[in-house]
Image (cartoon, rainbow, N blue to C red):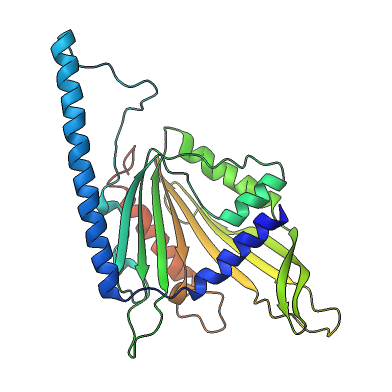
């Protein structure tokens, strides 16, 4: 288990230093992916149409519904997502994708903690999902490009969305002070140290049918030899989870939307207002509607 924790912690830190491709390369890759997706979708439609025609021809009736299928709205429309104008910070490129039967993810490290605390660690599956990442505006001269916000919207089975948010509160309560051992940077090089992870609900009920502002703090005790903090930078992260009907969105602010830095560009209230706008936009696709 410590290996799993160390891997996730490294991902948390390293993702902040990712060097992203130039915007032109991002757009080109997105166009290629869109063409491949369109081609695959076209092939799928042809195959499904052929199978349906065969079944109708043999039996004289439409094929029976798939076992376990859930009636109701399907794919999440693009209008249910936040727009760049809804973000209280400048944004650049916007990357998006859709999915089927995707796990509902909030925080990978929280899932590791949940498993150790005996909480249900299996992430629930969504029926449909739509995701987007809003990048930071390019700078001159060109440097690395980080993210401003990542948003995932999941459509869950009837009743499952409300239970998911309630279960999430229980998991956060169980992980209020989770201690792990990890390799960290010190003045004497890499060394093992105890890392304390603390998750808590910083605010709730501020948007949609249910809303949580989850805060994650990670800290390391001072180096025993020097008495000074090691090179491990303290970790602060927020997650906003908002439910509207059968839809759940997870917002991961980063970059210029971070409110825990010494001189934040936005306030916590502005971030909550962004979550309220996200809830309003989900109304066009939620079941029941707003």
**Could you say where residue 226 lies in the image, as x and y percent from the top left?**
83, 85
- Left or right, 255 with respect to 38, comes to right
Quadrant location of residue 286?
Answer: top left
Give the number of callouts: 0
- Give the vertical position of 169 relative to 86 (above or below): above
Name the residue furthest right: 225
- Give the vertical position of 125 relative to 241 (above or below): above
**Could you say where residue 159 lies in the image, as x and y percent from the top left?**
46, 33
Q: Please tell me which residue is depicted at 20% across the width and 31% down the height of the picture.
A: 47
Q: Please tell me which residue is depicted at 69% across the width and 57% down the height of the picture.
A: 3
Give whichever of 16, 35 is nearer the camera: 35
Give whichever of 90, 29 is nearer the camera: 29
The quadrant of the picture occupied by the C terminus is: top left
Quadrant location of residue 64?
Answer: top left
Name the residue furthest top: 59
- Left or right, 31 with respect to 118, comes to left
Give whichever of 264, 35 is nearer the camera: 35
Q: Please tell me which residue is depicted at 47% across the width and 44% down the height of the picture.
A: 103
**Could you say where residue 78 lies in the image, as x and y percent from the top left?**
26, 53
**Could you say where residue 20 lies in the image, as x and y percent from the top left?**
39, 73
- Give the vertical position of 91 relative to 78 (above or below): below
Name the residue furthest bottom: 141
- Give the vertical position of 32 relative to 41 (above or below): below
């Amino acid at each position: 288990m410590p290996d799993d924790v160390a891997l996730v912690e490294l991902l948390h830190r390293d993702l902040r230093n990712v060097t992203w491709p130039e915007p032109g390369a991002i757009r080109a890759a997105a166009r290629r992916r869109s063409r491949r997706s369109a081609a695959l979708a076209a092939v799928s439609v042809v195959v499904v149409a052929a199978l349906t025609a065969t079944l109708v021809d043999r039996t004289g009736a439409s094929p029976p519904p798939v076992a376990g299928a859930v009636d109701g709205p399907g794919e999440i429309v693009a209008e249910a997502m936040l727009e760049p104008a809804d973000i209280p910070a400048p944004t650049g490129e916007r990357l998006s994708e859709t999915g089927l039967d995707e796990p509902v993810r909030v925080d990978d490290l929280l899932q590791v903690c949940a498993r150790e605390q005996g909480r249900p660690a299996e992430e629930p599956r969504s029926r449909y999902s739509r995701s987007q990442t809003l990048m930071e505006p390019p700078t001159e001269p060109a440097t690395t490009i980080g993210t401003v916000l990542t948003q995932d919207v999941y459509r869950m089975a009837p009743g499952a969305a409300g239970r998911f948010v309630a279960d999430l509160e229980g998991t956060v309560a169980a992980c209020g002070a989770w201690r792990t051992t990890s390799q960290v940077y010190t003045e004497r090089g890499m060394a093992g140290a105890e890392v304390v992870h603390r998750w808590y609900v910083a605010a709730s009920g501020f948007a949609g049918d249910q809303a949580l502002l989850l805060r994650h703090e990670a800290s390391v005790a001072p180096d025993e030899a020097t008495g000074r903090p090691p090179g491990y930078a303290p970790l602060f992260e927020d997650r906003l989870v908002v439910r509207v009907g059968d839809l759940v969105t997870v917002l991961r602010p980063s970059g210029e939307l971070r409110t825990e830095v010494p001189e934040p560009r936005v306030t916590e209230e502005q971030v909550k207002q962004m979550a309220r706008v996200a809830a309003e936009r989900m109304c066009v696709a939620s079941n029941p509607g707003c």
